[in-house]
Every structure is written in C-alpha cells, then in structure tokens.
Amino acid sequence: MAGRTIRVNGVVVTPGQMPLPPAVNGSYYFQFSAGSFSWASWNFW
C-alpha cells in the first residue's frame, strides 16, 4: 500500500483505522489511489 491513499465513502482513512466513516445507503465503498508499486494487497476481516 506504499504511497497509496485509501478512501472509505469519500473520507481519507489510514490502514486499520476504526471506526469506519458512516455507511452510505447501508454500504461501504473503498477506493485506492495509484501507489509506488504496480502491485498491492488488501485484506478485510
């Protein structure tokens, strides 16, 4: 995730940040910007 920005429902968050911003229509939308590497991984528990 080096150099990437993470947004949840339009709000910038840091990895592992809790609680998440409020749900939009009962859902969470995750967006990841381009980063330092062409690859990245992400897990959701």
Image (tube, rainbow, N blue to C red):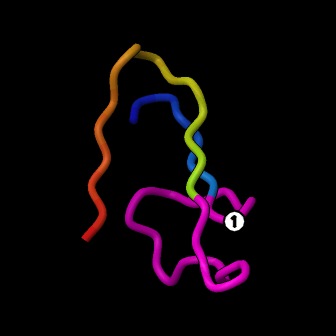
The residue lying toward the viewer, choosing from 22 and 35, is: 22
Locate residue 38, reporting x and y percent: 40, 14
Residue 19 appears left or right of 11: left
Q: Residues within 10 Å of mark 1 (few under 14, many from 20)?
A: some
| Residue that numbered label 1 is attached to | 9
Residue shown at the point (58%, 71%) measured from the top left:
28
Residue shown at the point (51%, 23%) measured from the top left:
35
**Up-down relation of residue 31 to residue 35 (above or below):** below
Residue shown at the point (74%, 59%) measured from the top left:
10
Q: Main secondary structure of the magenta part?
A: loop
Q: Is residue 4 magenta?
A: no
Q: Amino acid at mark 1?
A: Asn
Locate residue 33, reporting x and y percent: 60, 33
**Up-down relation of residue 37 to residue 7 (above or below):** above
Q: Is residue 13 magenta?
A: yes
Locate residue 19, reporting x and y percent: 51, 83
Residue 43 appears left or right of 9: left
Residue shown at the point (55%, 77%) measured from the top left:
20
Which secondary structure lies at badge 1?
A: loop
In the rendered structure, which segment of residues is drawn in magenta? 8-29
Q: Quadrant of the C terminus?
A: bottom left
